[in-house]
Image (cartoon, rainbow, N blue to C red):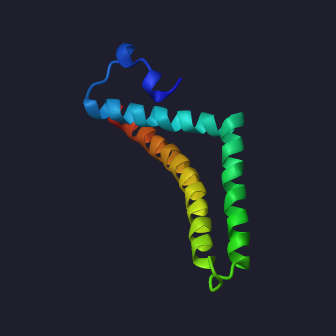
Amino acid sequence: MSTEEFDYSNVHFVSDQEREYFAEAHLGETVRSFLVGPVGRYLHGRAKQTISECKDKLADLDPTVKGGIAEWKTIKQDMANAESFMKWCSEAIVNGDNAASQLEEYRE
């Protein structure tokens, strides 16, 4: 169930802040579940593989030859895309964990 599909109607929140903490914590758990599933493991593995391959290509690249700079830019963009995917997943999980902690403190 994605965050958009979660039915909040049966949950009583004491404030909008508590609702935000809950939503962020739920999103973090959803991303964590995704990453341990087959599609998440595959995409995470592909991202790691892409980063490794890009590093190897950059090590062998001569930017002084014709097209070298364009190839360098393409490789760097491919690496950045893979790194962004991993970073976004990580941030969602960390933010979710932080929101869960804030939610626990909020109700104390």
> Hey, which residue is sitting farthest top in the picture?
10
Q: Position of residue 39 (x, y in %)?
A: 68, 36
| As drawn, 10 above or below 74 | above
Q: Is residue 33 visible in the rendered structure shown here?
A: yes
Tell me how many marks there are.
Answer: 0
Q: Residue furthest front?
A: 66
Q: Is residue 53 left or right of residue 14?
A: right
Q: Is residue 108 visible?
A: no
Q: Residue at x 62, y 76 (%)?
A: 67
Task: Identify the residue at horizontal 72%, vertical 35% (top origin).
Answer: 38
Write the residue at 32% across / 32% down.
Answer: 18
The quarter in which the C terminus is drawn is top left
Task: Tell me: residue 65, above or below residue 46.
Answer: below
Viewer-side residue, 73 vs 13: 73
Q: Which of the 4 image quarters holds residue 100?
A: top left
What residue do we see at 64% from left, 40% from top? Answer: 35
Measured along the vertical axis of the image, is residue 62 above or below residue 107?
Answer: below
106 or 48, nearer to the observer: 48
State the residue in front, 50 or 26: 50
Q: Quadrant of residue 62?
A: bottom right
Q: Position of residue 24 (x, y in %)?
A: 42, 37
Q: Position of residue 34 (x, y in %)?
A: 61, 35
The outermost residue toward the left is 15
